[in-house]
Image (cartoon, coloured by chain):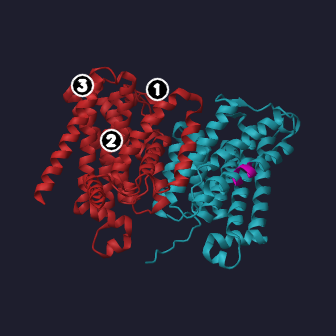
Chain colours: A cyan, B red
């Protein structure tokens, strides 16, 4: 029982990170129907920006987090303006290939600048190095901080999407972008804003992975990116609460599989769940089935 | 009409045989050295992969991101057979059973997943190919796990590559011209309308998927036999992406486009080897630029055929006549 609880806590910390990345995938997919492959590399950049802040400028965690989120936001918006905007009316597969191109570009430019080798984050001091013991269950301060920052960011996101004008515009564009444009909504600004929000969350996830796992490399985004996308599909792509549920679910499943059976199979189990969900409920857990009309 | 069909066939045969002979001569004269021969093999394998994926994605309109999975099944099957039976018949048996194994898995995976549409199908096939890779990674006793299989006997040479590549292209282009192929294209254009016309969309989607998987298996078998070494990492997600890039670059629904793109990319990557550290950066920039300025791919959905040349000839003649 104690081991199960311990695994669940580890799973929730990992799930928070998947959920943050999944939110970016799901928002972008909801608004322009694009699997943004470059998103996982924005997350990787977040980890590197945080690394530079913490080692070269000797900043604390919170300022590094903010700077990294801002820089990732900029990256996301620039990628959208340069690579995706010219393809607004092209076929979706062309945009997808462009996204793959952008993803490779970010990965290998980072590799050319920072080198391909693994780098490790500076050891955490003070509050971050502490941990809380409840009986035999060990919760590190890092886990508490990761989960609480994730929750704060999610509440903030829900507030922006549900209560602000730009959030209303985002929801309108994702339902019908032509109709939204006719109602006077600036579709391009709204799409850029969606990329900005998603990238900021990915940046936060990147730096938190850095302090949690301590090692970063230019290709670190690939597998977490795929799994976060699986999480988004699991919860119902385009649906924000769905991405959160999916992220936590995938995180917990992954930790439980590697805790109780062969850890080599953990990725296989994640993808098997994905295929099962797709076959049994193609629209995802929270998605509604839409009938195709002629 | 019959006469032109016969002369077309003759022209095709002559051009095929002369391509084969010229490259064989260049290999014999050592102008195409070992290094370039590896490039040649990569190009041939990529042509087989791209043309077979084009049947699934370009002609039938089913977006698949799992081609590397089928390729790995072919590669492992062929490698295991030729390791135990290193003879030419063993090699032929290995390639064929690799292809059949891949086709079987393709049919089994295709039946449930092909009900999905668009991006959902892409994600399901992606998950499927990752599962295949993880299974190969964990079957330690058979596949040697992450270390991979080494010293696979090498049987492929230009002759085998040429036979399998032209065979693939001929079979798939004839399939597309048949009534089955037209049924596949109608599903791409409008699935509901095709169903209304009495075309069983599931049947044709699974057929296209199985044929595509079959040839991906052949490509994988040739890969194992050419490069002597395989491990699960080679057949990851990025391999599927590489194939998709060739197909989209050449043009969805254009077999000659896939061939041209495979040859071009093969040559470009060979020359980019000189700039090893910025190779991938140049490649990605090229990809983005081509997609922004020519999103339909190099060929669109057009084909290069003999009629293009004869039309060109006609237009030249008519121009001359005017002067």
- Is there any visible trace of residue A291 in the rendered image? yes
Residue at position x 78%, y 49% in the image: A69
Mark 1 belongs to which subunit? B
Q: Position of residue A276 (x, y in %)?
A: 47, 56
Q: Which residue is mark 1?
A: B147
Cα separation between marks 3 and 1: 22 Å
Q: Earlier in the sequence, mark 3 or mark 2?
A: 3
Magenta region: which residues?
A72-77
For label 2, count other residues whose C-alpha is less than 10 Å away and answer few (under 14), some (14-19) or many (20+): many
Depth check: give the residue in front, A185 or B232: A185
Cα separation between marks 2 and 1: 21 Å
Q: Secondary structure at mark 2?
A: helix
Depth check: give the residue in front, B226 or B105: B226
The mark found on residue B29 in the picture is none
Q: Earlier in the sequence, mark 2 or mark 1?
A: 1
Badge 3 and badge 2 in a common chain:
yes
For label 3, count other residues whose C-alpha is less than 10 Å away and answer few (under 14), some (14-19) or many (20+): some
For label 1, count other residues whose C-alpha is less than 10 Å away and answer few (under 14), some (14-19) or many (20+): some
Cα separation between marks 3 and 2: 19 Å
Q: Which residue is mark 2?
A: B217
Q: Which residue is mark 3?
A: B85
Viewed as shown, does residue A186 lie left or right of B69? right
């Amino acid at each position: 029982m104690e081991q199960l609880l311990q695994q669940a806590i580890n799973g929730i910390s990992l799930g928070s990170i998947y959920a943050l990345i999944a939110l970016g995938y799901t928002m972008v997919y909801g608004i322009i129907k694009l699997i943004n492959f470059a998103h996982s590399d924005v997350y990787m950049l977040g980890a590197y920006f945080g690394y530079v802040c913490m080692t070269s400028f000797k900043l604390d965690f919170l300022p590094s987090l903010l700077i990294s989120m801002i820089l990732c936001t900029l990256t996301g918006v620039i990628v959208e303006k340069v690579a995706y905007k010219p393809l607004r009316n092209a076929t979706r597969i062309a945009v997808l290939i462009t996204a793959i191109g952008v993803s490779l570009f970010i990965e290998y430019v980072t590799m050319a600048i920072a080198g391909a080798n693994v780098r490790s984050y500076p050891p955490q001091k003070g509050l971050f190095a502490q941990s809380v013991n409840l009986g035999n269950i060990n919760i590190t301060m890092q886990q508490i901080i990761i989960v609480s920052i994730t929750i704060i960011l999610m509440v903030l996101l829900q507030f922006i999407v549900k209560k602000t004008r730009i959030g209303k515009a985002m929801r309108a564009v994702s339902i019908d972008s032509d109709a939204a444009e006719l109602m006077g909504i600036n579709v391009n600004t709204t799409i850029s804003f969606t990329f900005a929000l998603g990238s900021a969350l990915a940046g936060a996830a990147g730096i938190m992975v850095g302090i949690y796992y301590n090692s970063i490399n230019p290709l670190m985004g690939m597998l977490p990116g795929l799994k976060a996308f699986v999480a988004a599909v699991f919860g119902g792509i385009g649906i924000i609460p769905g991405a959160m549920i999916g992220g936590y679910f995938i995180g917990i499943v992954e930790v439980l599989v590697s805790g109780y059976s062969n850890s080599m199979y953990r990725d296989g189990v994640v993808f098997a769940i994905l295929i099962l969900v797709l076959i049994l409920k193609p629209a995802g857990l929270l998605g509604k089935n839409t009938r195709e009309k002629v | 009409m019959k006469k032109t069909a016969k002369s077309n066939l003759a022209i095709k045969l002559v051009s095929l045989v002369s391509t084969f002979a010229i490259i064989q001569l260049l290999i014999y004269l050592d102008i195409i050295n070992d290094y370039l021969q590896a490039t040649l093999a990569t190009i041939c394998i990529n042509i087989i992969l791209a043309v077979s994926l084009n049947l699934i994605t370009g002609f039938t309109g089913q977006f698949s991101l799992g081609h590397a999975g089928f390729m790995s099944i072919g590669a492992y099957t062929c490698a295991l057979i030729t390791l135990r039976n290193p003879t030419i018949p063993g090699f032929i048996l290995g390639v064929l059973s690799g292809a059949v194994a891949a086709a079987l898995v393709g049919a089994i995976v295709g039946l449930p997943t092909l009900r999905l549409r668009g991006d959902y199908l892409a994600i399901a096939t992606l998950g499927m190919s990752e599962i295949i890779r993880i299974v190969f990674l964990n079957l330690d006793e058979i596949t040697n796990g992450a270390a991979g299989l080494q010293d696979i006997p090498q049987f492929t040479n230009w002759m085998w590559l040429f036979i399998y590549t032209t065979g693939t292209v001929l079979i798939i282009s004839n399939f597309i011209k048949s009534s089955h192929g037209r049924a596949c294209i109608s599903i791409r254009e409008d699935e509901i309308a095709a169903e209304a016309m009495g075309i069983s969309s599931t049947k044709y989607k699974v057929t296209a998927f199985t044929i595509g998987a079959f040839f991906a298996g052949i490509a994988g078998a040739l890969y194992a036999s050419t490069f002597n070494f395989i491990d699960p990492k080679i057949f990851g997600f990025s391999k599927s992406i590489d194939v998709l890039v060739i197909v989209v670059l050449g043009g969805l629904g254009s077999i000659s486009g896939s061939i041209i793109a495979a040859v071009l990319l093969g040559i470009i990557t060979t020359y980019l080897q000189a700039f090893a550290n910025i190779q991938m950066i140049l490649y990605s920039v090229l990809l983005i630029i081509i997609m922004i300025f020519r999103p339909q791919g190099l060929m669109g959905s057009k084909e290069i055929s003999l009629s293009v040349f004869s039309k060109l000839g006609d237009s030249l003649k008519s121009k001359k006549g005017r002067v």
